[in-house]
Image (tube, rainbow, N blue to C red):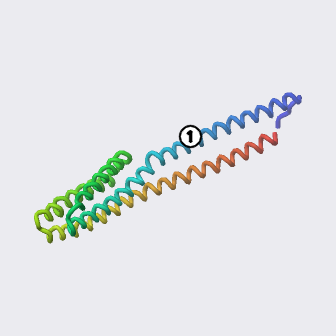
Amino acid sequence: MFQFKSIKTKLLGAFSIVIVLVILLGIYNISVVVKSNQSAEMIMKKELPLLIANEQMALTMANRISTARGYVLFGGEYKDRFNVYTEQGKEYEAVIRGLRDSEELDRLIEQTVAWRTMIVADVFDEYEKGNRDVAYRNLAVADEGALELMAGYIKMAQVSEDTINEMEQLILESGKATLRTVAIVTVLVVLL
């Protein structure tokens, strides 16, 4: 292969190879760390907040339908609770819209707004007019819509959870590949 004429040349050659291997290892490690950091940042800034917001939207839907039922059955403060949950839902809607732009989410949020409007107009207003039977019937229809909306938000949360799991797997695989690469380079350096 190579014919070295002196020990000095052999040492310089071996040292040069070691330096090149260390530089390549450094470049590889930096690229893996940058990619892992980007994935972790995406999880932290986008996917995790989306997961939380979608789960909370499903929860506020359950809370709103429960308080609407309570209002129709007992009147009183249930309407105020409904409004509190509605405001919380609006905050989560804003988070969702700010983090992901998709037709499915936009449609889901629009349906949520329509459902909320229906509860106020067709359930609460009818109840306050004294049309309790109409309010009960309208609430039964609204229950079905709420369950569909809750399922939609749970589905969106699952999408975020799946994305987080995929990114975590990529980060772990990158870490394992880096460990293998470091081990191989270490062995090569020792052998030289």
Residue located at (28% from left, 65% from top): 66
Of 65 and 94, nearer the camera is 65
- 32 left or right of 141? right
Of 119 and 101, nearer the camera is 119
Residue 107 visible: no
x and y percentages locating residue 114 in the rendered image: 22, 57
Identify residue for label 1.
34
Residue located at (22% from left, 65% from top): 71
- 45 left or right of 145? right
Specify the farthest residue to the front: 76
Of 125 and 165, nearer the camera is 125
- 38 left or right of 145? right
x and y percentages locating residue 184 in the rendered image: 73, 46
Residue located at (61% from left, 38% from top): 30
- 75 left or right of 163? left
Q: Determine which quarter of the picture holds residue 117.
A: bottom left
Dot 1: within a 10 Å radius of its alpha carbon, few (fewer than 14), some, or many (20 or more) residues? Answer: few
Name the secondary structure under disc 1.
helix
x and y percentages locating residue 130 in the rendered image: 11, 66
Classify the position of the N terminus by image quarter: top right
Residue 192 visible: yes
Q: Determine which quarter of the picture holds residue 72.
A: bottom left
Classify the position of the C terminus by image quarter: top right
Name above or below for residue 30 compared with residue 105: above
Residue located at (88% from left, 30% from top): 7
The residue type indicated by label 1 comes to Val
